[in-house]
Amino acid sequence: MAKTDGEKVWRIVARVDDEIIVKQSDIVEKAIRSARNAVCQRLCKSAGINYELGWWKGRKHKDRRDFVDNFLGKPLYLLKDEKVEVEHHDVPCEVYTIEMVRLKFRKMTLLSPENIDAWGNLHWGQGDDEKFNLLGAKLPIPPHLCIGEDFEEEEVIAISDAQTCLDECPGCKSDVPFGTIILITEHFRLTPTQCCSQMIWTREKPSLDNEDWS
């Protein structure tokens, strides 16, 4: 832990839209954490979603931390009352969309069969514009599927019609309903079952020549 003494502090400057955020502490890790939280609160406010305490904790939320860190400049060790010079911190002008923020901060709570449609869209509301497509999105991999391996998240590289791939629902063993899909990553498959409302993960490396994938 990097700690300072005297009248010097670690200062972090961040920018969200046109708002400049300044945080400082005698411990660099504390300054970074404070800046991250302030940026997260500002992003959640812009997206109209609730700020979640502990949003950064745990392996599964690494993508959240990485996203927020894109708004932070580099930490500088300077006098406590020294004038804030934004350009000295190399503060980026990060561009984002409301959909990006909702994907990063609500994906885990929204990711359920009820919110995923037959085209692979994840819905956060009832409107036609309140959705985003999971093709190309990164999904956190359940830890029990990758013990001892370096899998944290994987990109959805294809979406398949489950009726063409499965003889029965892997959860309740009933017939696969029309509109059920499979989200396919490089090493895993995720089936949001419509009949028994489960998110079923399997470890499987599929062939890339399936014409039913989109």
Image (tube, grey):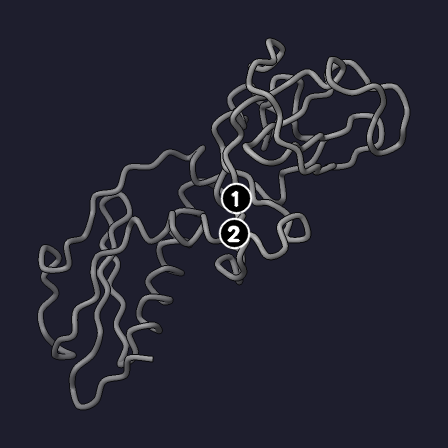
Q: On the rendered structure, is 88 left or right of 156?
A: left
Question: Amino acid under label 2?
Answer: Asp
Q: On the rendered structure, is 142 left or right of 199?
A: left
Q: Quadrant of residue 97?
A: top left
Location of mark 2 (residue): 150
Residue 104 spot, x, y in % from top left = 48, 43
Q: On the rendered structure, is 134 left or right of 64?
A: right
Residue 23 spot, x, y in % from top left = 27, 67
Residue sitting nearer the eye, 199 or 53:
199
Write the residue at 51% across / 44% down: 49
Residue 20 spot, x, y in % from top left = 22, 54
Please tell me whether mark 1 sits on a helix, a strand or a loop: strand
Residue 1 spot, x, y in % from top left = 34, 80
Write the residue at 33% across / 53% down: 69
Write the residue at 51% across / 53% down: 61
Residue 153: mark in rendering: 1
Within 10 Å of the Cα at label 1, are there few (<14), some (14-19), or many (20+) other Cα atoms? some
Within 10 Å of the Cα at label 2, are there few (<14), some (14-19), or many (20+) other Cα atoms? few
Q: Residue furthest bottom?
A: 6
Query: Compared with residue 192, is residue 148 higher up or lower down, i.e. above or below?
Result: below
